[in-house]
Amino acid sequence: MTKLPDIIRHIEELAGHRLGKDEGVHHGNACIPVTSATVAWMASPDAIEAAGQSGHQVLICHESLYYPYDVLYSSQPPPDWKSWKVNRQRRELLERYGLTCLRIHGSADEICIFDAFAELLGLGKPVIAEGLVKVYEIPGCPLDELVRNVKRRMGMAAVRVADGRDMQRTVRRVGLPWGGLGLFVNVGYQQRLAELGCDVFIAGESDNYGFRFAAESGIPMIETSHELSENPGLRRFTALLAQAFPNVTFRFYENECIWRMA
């Protein structure tokens, strides 16, 4: 019978290293036998409910289980964080269904999440690859044409663009701050892409400071969403686990984009 440590070892083999310090079992039984598991971008209440109602033993999530981000590893967490409604209801749902929660973050990025985002965007092979810092070249086109292509490929009615004042500027060298790498806390990633000559970014999620860093660097940034930029890779990750463990049922749960245009 497959147990959770077997799955963890296989993930480590795929990644080529041990799990990162922010990865591992964040709730439940670390040695539980596994006959079925759900993979999701985030252990949101709907994802937990879906896994629990399916009778699965494990929920494998990509993002932090609790708030604030990575609070389990914080040296100065808010003293009452466990009682916050969001954290309490997630924990109670996991306990109600007897679910173990395994977080796989950077390892899944390396195994397939980044590459699946690039493939979804139709970018081909990178012209520069330094680990997860990759640069892609496309035939030169106006920024507004690239925006339309991104919306079509992502299945999105709208995206945010910063700085979008000159939508006719030609872009041809693409960097991908996927997931949350467009956020202000990760501007070092944008800086490295700028140093490598990128003239446009296609990001997962950004914020005001992140957008302004790109704009002041002279590089427009197209924002899709954190979830949508990583869901394709997590779907592929689910398939890889299913192939490796044919005696275990793996199901992908799709976290939808949390925001709507109004």
Image (tube, grey):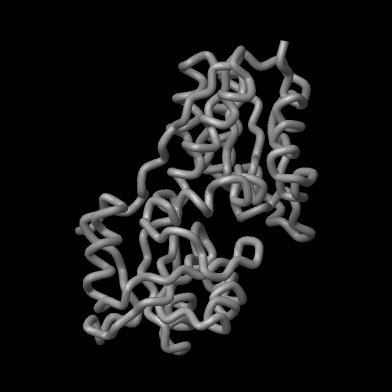
Residue 255: x, y in percent?
41, 40
Which quarter of the image is occupied by the N terminus?
top right
Q: Residue at x 63, y 20 (%)?
A: 245
Q: Nearer the viewer, residue 217 or 29?
A: 217
Which quarter of the image is occupied by the C terminus?
bottom left
Count of numbered labels shown in the rendering = 0
Q: Against 10, is 85 above or below? A: below
Q: Against 105, is 210 above or below? A: below
Q: Residue at x 61, y 12 (%)?
A: 247
Instruction: Specify whether 136 is left or right of 262.
Output: right
Residue 179: x, y in percent?
50, 57
Instruction: Specify whether 45 is left or right of 110.
Output: left
Residue 114: x, y in percent?
53, 54
Q: Against 246, is 147 above or below? A: below
Q: Quadrant of residue 76?
A: bottom right
Q: Residue at x 74, y 38 (%)?
A: 13
Q: Residue at x 53, y 27 (%)?
A: 38
Q: Quadrant of residue 220?
A: bottom left
Residue 190: x, y in percent?
54, 76
Q: Against 72, is 235 above or below? A: above
Instruction: Specify whether 195 is left or right of 74.
Output: left
Q: Nearer the viewer, residue 83 or 7?
A: 7
